[in-house]
Image (cartoon, grey):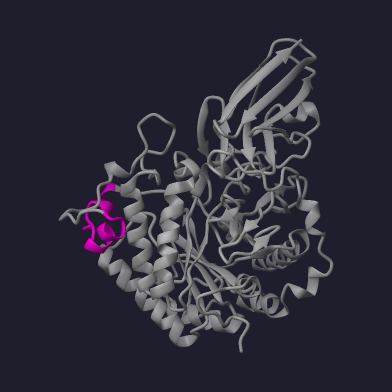
Amino acid sequence: MSQGTFDGSMPRPVLEYYLSHAASAQWFSASDTLDDDIRVVKKTGLKFLGRAAGIWKGDLPEEDDFARAKMAADKMHEADPEVILQACIFEVVYREDLESVPVPAWAFEAFGLPVEDRNFRFDDCLFPPNVGAWDNMPDISRQETQLWFYYRGRRYIDCGYEAFHMGQIHLYAAFDKGYAGIGKVIGMLRDYGKQHARRHKVLFDAHSHSLVVNGVSLLDYNAMPFTRWPFPDRPGEKLALVREGKSGGGVSPEGVYEKALPFLYEYDNWGGRDHWAYEHQTYAERAWNQWWGGDQISWFASQPEEERNKFLDYTFKWTAVNNPDGFFAFPLMRGIGVGGDGQDHVYKLNNRSAACPEGYSQEDEAARLLHMGYGAYRDLANPSDLLDFGGRDVDDPETGVRYPEKVVLYGSFQPYVGANENDSNSEITRMYDIGDGKYALAFVMPFAGTYDFGVSTWGTLSACVCRTHRFPYSGAGGKSPLVIEQDNTVVRVVFNIRTLEITVETRA
């Protein structure tokens, strides 16, 4: 029996089998080189294809999109029925996508609502105005958003998809008290999957380090992009990976307590190369502009082939050694944004050939690493206790939501207290758990001036807040001023995770 055999239940060793053979396969269902992509999947031994279908902004009529998704899944499963394909439900909605789709009767019935003859309503999915959310970010606490998420998830299950990436979940769940809304939708999709999924089981991940309510994780595993540290003093765009946060623990959806759930890393995309940076910034300035003036996959794709192969090798070994619960989703295919020619481009692992003329020729290196496996380095891995930051398994008494184990102050003030500037993962400016959902840090600022700061939960930039922008945001922007009027001022910052309130006390 294969290690990947499951039906209705997936114990952790089976889940890790799939995650240890994972790839980011963004829009696999829309690939114009699908036959060659499937060849690469079989050659490398990949078993989990993340982001294989989904929409950010729809480019096809709804039924055509699902037909395309089903065709790709059927073709992949004919070649290897063991492969899991993942669909995406993201933190963004568009009026023209929702309002062109009729709400099916079964969606109303699943929520116990009267059946109506209408389409989805965009305006009924949104956050209230002026709270800090994107204009097209759905609020999962609203029933219309729950209908939309459930509808898309159920359609993908019917197309043969057995996993879901739920995007930046902490952003669209910002008003979802106790994660009741997203918990309801995930639970409904799990129940539907028990009856109708290919192997009566569906998996969920999101950009999160923990989504635990009353001790139970809503997700099967956590997933995040990598974090980097650039080296402007070296020729070429060199950088190192940095261990950021950790995967939280809790009772898994299988009913087993896990000290740390599995964790999946990936090379993310969010906008491609910053052509302005290449024209207007110095080499050193560009080093600190995201990933050398780009997102992760566009930086990776822009490196020479030999350097890309070295970085794949480095990433695989780094993951094995630095996070014993971690796995790397190899980049099978990923959008790399708009190029200098104004056209959208896609990175593909495939060897360049007539069947895939845009291939980046890295399938042989990926096959070598995947066939070698994490076991070649796991025995050298640092123990998981190195990733513990205290405050384990502390839940909010009202909602049952688990508090983060690590909360960090970051910003331009950090070098003045011995840390690196804008380091959301710093141990030096980590806040201390002082109880009742509050975290505090005191420090001395030696020089007067105006600085900035924000708070990162779990020590990452996935769900940050600041005094002037308490709605969670993602990324390094949005920090608030920290005004120091005298040299040698003592500062104490207190952050309340329950209310997202930040207070600052200064004493000269």
Position of 228 compared to 220: left or right?
A: right
Q: Position of residue 19 (x, y in %)?
A: 61, 70
Does residue 435 belong to the magenta stretch?
no
Question: Residue 3 lies in what quarter of the image?
Answer: bottom right
Q: Quadrant of the C terminus?
A: top right
Position of 234 compared to 407: left or right?
A: right
Kindly give the residue lying farthest to the left in the view shown. 117
Position of 46 compared to 508: left or right?
A: left
On screen, residue 270 above or below 315: above
Q: Position of residue 100 (x, y in %)?
A: 22, 55
**Residues drawn in magenta:** 95-112
Q: Is residue 14 visible?
A: yes
Q: Nearer the viewer, residue 351 or 255?
A: 255
Question: Residue 483 lies in what quarter of the image?
Answer: top right
Question: Residue 267 lies in what quarter of the image?
Answer: bottom right
Q: Nearer the viewer, residue 231 or 132?
A: 132
Kindly give the residue lying farthest to the front in the view shown. 397
Q: Quadrant of the N terminus?
A: bottom right
Q: Position of residue 387 (x, y in %)?
A: 76, 52
User: At 15% across and 56% down in the image, what residue appears?
Assistant: 117
Q: Is residue 30 visible?
A: no
User: At 59% across and 34% down in the image, what residue appears?
Assistant: 497
On screen, residue 259 above or below 366: above
